[in-house]
Image (cartoon, helix red, strand yellow):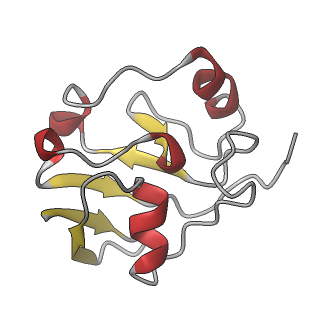
Amino acid sequence: MSKMTFIKPDGTRVEVDAPLGKTILDIAQQNGLELEGACEGSLACSTCHIIVDEEDFERLPDASDDEEDMLDLAYGLTPTSRLGCQVVMTEELEDLIVSLPSGFNNQLF
């Protein structure tokens, strides 16, 4: 079992257990954190937008073209933005730090 840290919009840090093979979206929701996931992880929206800590971003696999397209619709997009439904927890991501944006665009496609 790995660990990771979520930073809420108000700056509160929440360290959680992060089971290997689970997506960041699943981990956030299982821990009662507000990460929407309106399309239920089907890569049809940007409501699970997360901002990965700059130091951790290079450890993630590259985003697919489809994820990049959905990210273009995300609220508060940054250079280290990803979709939580597309990032799967692995041993290499131990101690990952992600911030939850203060809002989201709820547009399903």
Task: Return the residue found at the far top.
Answer: 65
The relative height of residue 27 versus residue 23 in the rendered view (above or below) is below
The relative height of residue 58 versus residue 56 in the rendered view (above or below) is above
| Residue at the spot 75% in from the left edge and 54% down from the top edge | 39
Q: Is 95 left, or right, of 61 in this rendering?
A: left
Q: Position of residue 92 (x, y in %)?
A: 12, 39
Q: Quadrant of residue 31?
A: bottom left
| Residue at the spot 12% in from the left edge and 55% down from the top edge | 95
Q: Position of residue 100 (x, y in %)?
A: 44, 61
Q: Is 57 left, or right, of 94 in this rendering?
A: right
| Residue at the spot 29% in from the left edge and 78% down from the top edge | 12
Q: Is 109 left, or right, of 1 in this rendering?
A: right
The relative height of residue 92 versus residue 17 in the rendered view (above or below) is above
Q: Is 86 left, or right, of 6 in this rendering?
A: right
Q: Position of residue 28 (x, y in %)?
A: 42, 69
Task: Return the residue found at the far bottom.
Answer: 32
Numbered marks: total:
0
Q: Quadrant of residue 72?
A: top right
The relative height of residue 68 versus residue 85 in the rendered view (above or below) is above
Quarter in which the C terminus is drawn: top right
| Residue at the spot 13% in from the left edge and 65% down from the top edge | 1
Q: In which quarter of the image is residue 17?
A: bottom left
Q: Position of residue 86 (x, y in %)?
A: 49, 40
